[in-house]
Image (cartoon, rainbow, N blue to C red):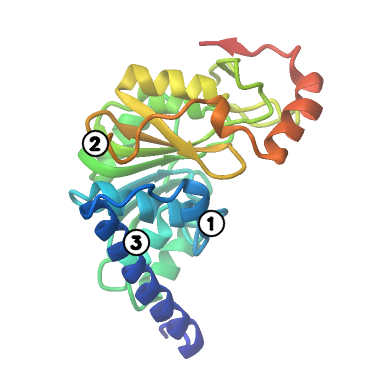
Amino acid sequence: MLLGSMESDMTCGTQAAQVLLEQRYKDMARRNIRPLPTFDEAGFRCCSQFEEDGILLYIFSLIGVTNKTAVEICAGDGIQCNSANLIINHGWHGYLFDGDRKNVVRGSQYYRRHKDTFLWPPKLTHAWITAENVDRTLQDAGVEGEVDLLSVDVDGMDYWIWKAINCINPRVVVCETHNVIPADKALTVPYDRSFKISVEDYHGASLAAMTKLAKEKGYRLAGTHRYGFNAFFIRNGVGEELLPAVGVQDCLLHPYAKHRSRDAWPKVGNLPWEQV
């Protein structure tokens, strides 16, 4: 059985509104209307955890797409993730990976039943991603070369996994960072292929660390969602006049980000972080 009528109607309404919004953004860019919206103004949540759906729609409305391919590492069941809205409402092709087999089964069933994806559902792959196997895992799933989007949110080895990826060339990268770490510190947890969180707030990498890695790989920080820990990096040479680089400090001004750094960092600051 496909989606019930109520959920189907909601999907149709979302699609229509998003198509109109996409065309509005394109028109603003084409007519050189300034100022353009900020990420804070463009953000909304449809399938993402926070307002990543709106920010990604905004980014790709401005910079365009190539092959509408999204790769997401640690996508959970793929129903709530950064790629889901693009796949369901905008016809994108997805390669989603997760280390929990139950998530992969549940997500595969969902997309095979969904009216907008049942003919060509995204490919969900069960895999524990490490720096050593990430390229091989992506290639084995059938994805390499140019892609429009890479999303990395593994709650631990995010820095090291993005650093190790060479087989795909994403135009936009979304990474979760750890805003417990002060803005001026480029730190990550040391590499451990078997890492699991055992101490609260000791995981991941700072926004400064991911921005430094982004620069090494040819990307710029274009902004974050309002809370400052999900960051959007765009490949240099792609849409720079529309979405220029921003500073790390400018992304961590929300009261939540200040609260996390002020209250949580003293509890974990003396743990063995690695400077990059």
The answer to whether the residues at label 3 and label 2 have Cβ atoms under 8 Å apart is no
Task: Decide which of tag 2 and tag 1 comes sooner along the chain.
Answer: 1
Measured Cα–Cα span from mark 3 to mark 1 = 21 Å
Q: Is residue 194 visible in this depiction of the protein?
A: no
Report the disc number at residue 150.
none
Of residue 243 and residue 108, the one placed in the foreground of this image is 243
Helix, strand, or loop for circle 2? loop
Can you identify the residue that label 1 sits on? 102
Residue at coordinates 50% horizontally, 53% vertically from top-left? 41
Helix, strand, or loop for circle 1? helix
Of residue 15 and residue 27, the one placed in the foreground of this image is 27
Report the disc number at residue 238.
2
Between disc 3 and disc 1, the foreground one is 3
**Type of residue at label 1?**
Lys
Count every numbered label the image shows and give the total.
3
Measured Cα–Cα span from mark 3 to mark 2 = 22 Å
Can you identify the residue that label 3 sits on? 87
Question: From the viewer's perspective, is 231 left or right of 168?
Answer: right
Question: From the viewer's perspective, is 71 left or right of 37?
Answer: left
**Type of residue at label 3?**
Ile
Question: From the viewer's perspective, is 177 left or right of 244?
Answer: right
Residue 98: image location, x then y, percent: 47, 46
**Type of residue at label 2?**
Val
Of residue 157 and residue 147, the one placed in the foreground of this image is 147
Question: From the viewer's perspective, is 183 left or right of 223?
Answer: right
Residue 257: image location, x then y, percent: 68, 35
Residue 34: image location, x then y, percent: 34, 48
